[in-house]
Image (cartoon, grey):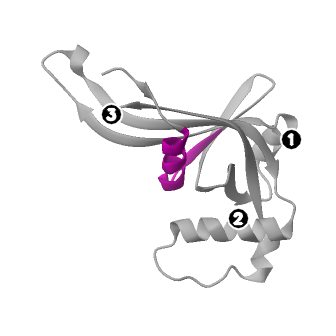
């Protein structure tokens, strides 16, 4: 079956529902890609991470990033290998990544991630832990999506 472009509304639904996304970065011709938990919020993606790491070096040198998620379907087979395929829906986001410096935006976006992933009520993040975490914000410039269903 030919691949089909997704609407922006469907892309946003997939971003809302996906549990893992992959942040791809590049600097000096060297790619770097990491999986993250995240939340999509009004044209932005927020990622919870630590205060240090290679990702910060990459983002500092080149804020242009790609973020992708996929909603897998089922494997399809047939008598011929040419009939084998895998169903999917995928979304690619292009944008600019930056560190969230505002304590209010950090707390708000962290709470949205907690709300997305929690299974039961949880206690608030202890105040002493807040200085030890960082949030990456991706300001989305373009969203595209495709499906093979």
Instruction: Estimate the spatial distance between the alpha carbons at disc 2 and disc 3, rounded to whole Å.
Output: 32 Å
Q: Residue at x 73, y 46 (%)?
A: 138
- Mark sitting earlier along the chain (2/1): 1
Q: Residue at x 57, y 71 (%)?
A: 115
Q: Give the dominant element type of the magenta stretch: helix, strand or loop.
A: helix
Judging by the rendered image, the residue that carries numbered circle 2 is: 109
SS under mark 1: helix
Q: Quadrant of residue 78?
A: top left
Q: Is residue 46 above or below residue 78?
A: below
Can residue 54 be seen in the rendering of this structure? no
**Rendered image: mark on residue 87:** 3
User: Quick check: is 70 in the magenta stretch?
Assistant: no
Judging by the rendered image, the residue that carries numbered circle 1 is: 60
Q: Please state the horizontal and vertical placement of residue 141, each as a whole percent of the image.
A: 72, 36
Residue stretch in magenta: 8-23
- Mark sitting earlier along the chain (2/3): 3
Instruction: Estimate the spatial distance between the alpha carbons at disc 2 and disc 1, rounded to whole Å.
Output: 21 Å
Q: Quadrant of residue 74?
A: top left
């Amino acid at each position: 079956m030919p691949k089909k472009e997704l609407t922006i509304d469907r892309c946003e639904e997939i971003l809302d529902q996906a549990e893992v996304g992959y942040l791809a970065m590049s600097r000096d011709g060297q790619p770097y890609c990491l999986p993250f938990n995240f939340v999509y919020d009004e044209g932005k993606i927020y990622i919870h991470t630590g205060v240090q790491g290679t990702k910060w070096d990459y983002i500092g040198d080149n804020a242009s990033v790609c973020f992708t998620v996929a909603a897998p379907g089922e494997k399809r087979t047939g008598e011929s290998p040419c009939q084998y395929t895998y169903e999917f829906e995928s979304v690619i986001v292009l944008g600019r990544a930056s560190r969230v410096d505002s304590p209010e935006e950090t707390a708000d976006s962290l709470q949205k991630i907690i709300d997305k992933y929690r299974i039961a009520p949880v206690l608030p993040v202890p105040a002493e832990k807040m200085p030890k975490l960082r949030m990456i914000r991706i300001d989305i410039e373009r969203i595209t999506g495709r499906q093979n269903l």
